[in-house]
Image (cartoon, rainbow, N blue to C red):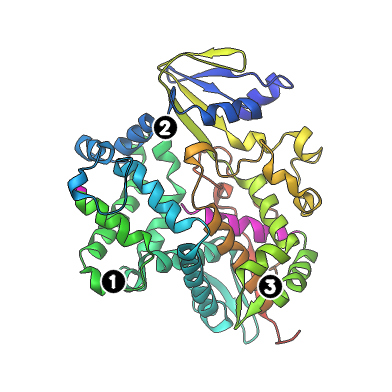
């Protein structure tokens, strides 16, 4: 619907309104208006939207109120001079963990160690979603494999090895829930969202059992996990990575020459079987350009705010009491910025024009105070995974297959999944050392 409206109003990019189930929703698509909206934190409220989503997800009024109440200075655990409620302090804790620095390096190193253990023919061949195995290759589902490895790697990075040992099915339950989180955004009635609710319940129950284990027995956790737990106990109370990895490898599979380009580019970046992340970032423009182009096409994050006062935007007055949406994906198809072939994957687009990542139309992770703090670890995990794969395996499609369709009909909080379960069967063949 939004794509149709965009085409209807082009080339004019003034705000417009649609009515959904009796509620008015303003849509902003002009990059300048988007920047203005993100900067306006007084009359465009994110808190009200979050509170509504928390209640839809099953949080009680008491829990929502607790999350947004000012903290008791007598019980302060972490420095919080602004006395932010936990709902907002959580973002600060996440930023401390996920922005470049010691904590992010530690988190990324856990990912790399997990990938190093996982990416060999013997280990890959043991997965239940493998279609066939020989002495020299394995055929398996790309979507399931990338989801499994990235989710389990993230689980170990954040929670240490104990969670996988005590809750071996939790990662699979989370995958089911994650693919259906759009039902929360749509506020689906419970009788239509049974699968999502059941999977969510299993994830919550598994995490509750995990946190009931004494903290001293839960070694290997990321800094953020016990920090957030401590704050939540004080009160009394995304998965973009895997999808980004799937689409990045999919794009490369349909332009096979890219594997050798990335293999040659990243070969000198490895130390003791693991990539040096600084070298990957600074010395591998083709690898980073493929990532940027992949998320340009597959990111579907939309930002929603509640309007608390009548607000002028783009020559229009947006009336209070309604919501405003910024569909960031539509900015990525701005021909005046990205060129005529905006719907095509062009692996050199960002290599030839590095300034695109600083353009107002570049918003794969949202913007303003709600810009995704996980954007750095998402990129590091995926580019490291791809670099390790191309050094260890030859990878190809297992027979003729169509390019998977993007699931652009459901709202997501980041990168889209594939439509209708579209997937690819791939063949992995271990490379001989030095080849």
Q: Position of residue 53 (x, y in %)?
A: 36, 36
In the image, taking residue 396 as reference, residue 44 lies left or right, namely: left
Q: Secondary structure at mark 3?
A: helix
Q: CA distance from mark 3 to mark 2?
A: 41 Å
| Residue neighbourhood size for the residue with mark 3, other residues' Cα within 10 Å, grouped as few (<14), some (14–19), many (≥20) | many
| Residue neighbourhood size for the residue with mark 2, other residues' Cα within 10 Å, grouped as few (<14), some (14–19), many (≥20) | some
Q: Secondary structure at mark 1?
A: loop
Residue carrying label 2: 46
Number of the front mark, 3 or 2: 2
Q: CA distance from mark 1 to mark 3?
A: 34 Å
Write the start and end of the magenta stretch as one range: 235-254
Residue 432, quarter of the rendered image: bottom right
* Tag shown at residue 218: 1
Q: Position of residue 265 (x, y in %)?
A: 75, 70
| Residue neighbourhood size for the residue with mark 1, other residues' Cα within 10 Å, grouped as few (<14), some (14–19), many (≥20) | some
* Tag shown at residue 390: 3
| Residue 258 forms part of the magenta stretch | no
Quadrant showing the N terminus: top right
Asked whether the residues under the numbered discs 1 and 3 touch, taking CB atoms below 8 Å apart as contact, a structural biologist would say: no
Q: Residue at x 61, y 40 (%)?
A: 363
């Amino acid at each position: 619907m939004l794509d149709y409206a965009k085409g209807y109003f082009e080339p004019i990019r003034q705000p417009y309104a649609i009515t959904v189930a009796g509620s008015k929703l303003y849509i902003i698509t002009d990059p300048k208006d988007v920047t203005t909206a993100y900067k306006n934190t007084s009359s465009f409220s994110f808190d009200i939207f979050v509170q509504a989503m928390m209640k839809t997800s099953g949080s009680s009024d008491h829990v929502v109120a607790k999350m947004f109440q000012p903290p008791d200075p007598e019980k302060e655990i972490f420095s919080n001079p602004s006395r932010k409620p936990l709902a907002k302090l959580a973002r600060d804790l996440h930023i401390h963990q996920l922005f470049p620095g010691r904590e992010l390096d530690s988190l990324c190193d856990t990912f790399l160690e997990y990938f190093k253990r996982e990416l060999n023919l013997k280990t890959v061949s043991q997965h239940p979603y493998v279609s066939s195995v020989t002495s020299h290759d394995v055929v398996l589902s790309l979507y399931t494999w990338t989801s499994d490895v990235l989710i389990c790697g993230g689980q170990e990075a954040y929670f240490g090895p104990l969670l996988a040992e005590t809750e071996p099915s939790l990662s699979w339950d989370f995958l089911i829930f994650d693919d259906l989180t759009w039902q929360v955004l749509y506020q689906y009635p419970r009788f239509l969202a049974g699968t999502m609710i059941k999977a969510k319940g299993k994830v919550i129950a598994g995490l509750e059992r995990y946190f009931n284990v004494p903290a001293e027995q839960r070694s290997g956790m990321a800094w953020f996990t016990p920090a957030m737990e401590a704050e939540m106990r004080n009160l009394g109370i995304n998965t973009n990575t895997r999808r980004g990895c799937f689409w990045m490898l999919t794009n490369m599979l349909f332009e096979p020459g890219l594997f050798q380009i990335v293999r040659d580019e990243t070969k000198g970046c490895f130390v003791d079987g693991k990539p040096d992340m600084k070298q990957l970032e600074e010395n591998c423009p083709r690898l980073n350009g493929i990532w940027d182009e992949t998320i340009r096409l597959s990111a579907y994050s939309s930002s929603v705010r509640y309007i608390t006062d009548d607000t002028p935007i783009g020559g229009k007055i947006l009336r209070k009491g309604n919501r405003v949406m910024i569909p960031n994906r539509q900015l990525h198809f701005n021909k005046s910025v990205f060129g005529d072939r905006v719907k095509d994957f062009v692996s050199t687009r960002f290599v030839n024009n590095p300034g695109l990542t600083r353009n107002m139309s570049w918003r794969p992770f949202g913007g303003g105070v709600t810009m995704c703090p996980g954007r750095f670890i998402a990129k590091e995990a995926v580019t490291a995974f791809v670099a390790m794969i191309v050094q260890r395996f030859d990878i190809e499609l297992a027979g003729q297959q169509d390019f998977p369709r993007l699931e652009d009909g459901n709202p997501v909080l980041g990168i889209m999944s594939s439509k209708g379960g579209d997937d690819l069967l791939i063949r992995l063949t271990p490379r001989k050392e030095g080849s």
